[in-house]
Amino acid sequence: MDTYYNKIVEILVHNVGINREELFIKSGYTSKREFISELNILQSTFRIATKYDRHIYCPRVLTLVELNHEKDQLIRTIPLNYLPTEVLIEKLNFKENGTEPEDSIDYLLEIAGYELKEEDKAFMEMHSKAVLDFNKYSYDLWAEYLQPKFSLQENEFE
């Protein structure tokens, strides 16, 4: 199942840290122009980012974190299917408190986490294939860019 709704992002999730040439080969594109155009679109919509001043692409993924606050314990992390920011804003009834970048849902997702409410349960279960129990646990939604592992011994990315 394509959980990221884009073959390039899907490849990057499963091959974090591959370079642009490897990505081009795995993507199945025959036109470099179309491939580069797609990369530019993915970057402009914050689906992928480049790292390390090289053409190392990192995909953005969403994760649901299940917490037991009574025991101050992380129960599990749950990967989510890709959801565009516009969909999250609509389905989670997100209201910005201002015009600064810190007021956006993307900022919250990457820096502070977004605390879900019980009314978000059905929507999150539909996109996570997990059963959520708001009576026992609380849930935070996070976004992050997957990073390649760096080997200090070999001074290269793995």
Image (cartoon, rainbow, N blue to C red):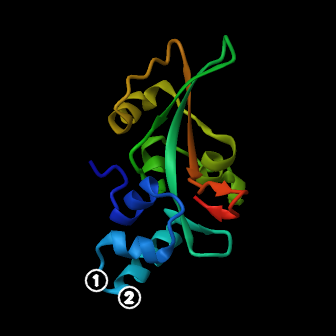
Along the line of sight, which residue is nearer the eye, 36 or 106?
36
Where, quadrant-wise, is the C terminus in this rendering? bottom right
- Which label was assigned to residue 30? 1
Identity of the residue drawn at 57% across and 66% down? 49
Instruction: Verify CB contact (< 8 Å) between mark 2 and mark 1.
Output: no
Q: Specify whether residue 75 is in view.
A: yes
Relative to 49, residue 102 above or below: above
Q: Residues within 10 Å of mark 2 (few under 14, many from 20)?
A: few
Relative side of 49 to 130, left or right: right
Give the Cα separation between the discs numbered 2 and 1: 9 Å
Q: Is residue 4 left or right of residue 108?
A: left
Whole-percent x, y for residue 23 in the image: 42, 71
Q: Secondary structure at mark 1?
A: loop
Element at badge 2? helix
**Image quadrant assignment for residue 57:** bottom right
Name which residue lies at 33% across and 57% down.
5
Identity, as a three-letter code, of the amino acid under mark 1: Thr
| Residue 110 percent location from the top left of the image | 63, 49
Q: Which residue type does callout 2 highlight?
A: Arg
Location of mark 2 (residue): 33
Q: Residue at x 43, y 82 (%)?
A: 36
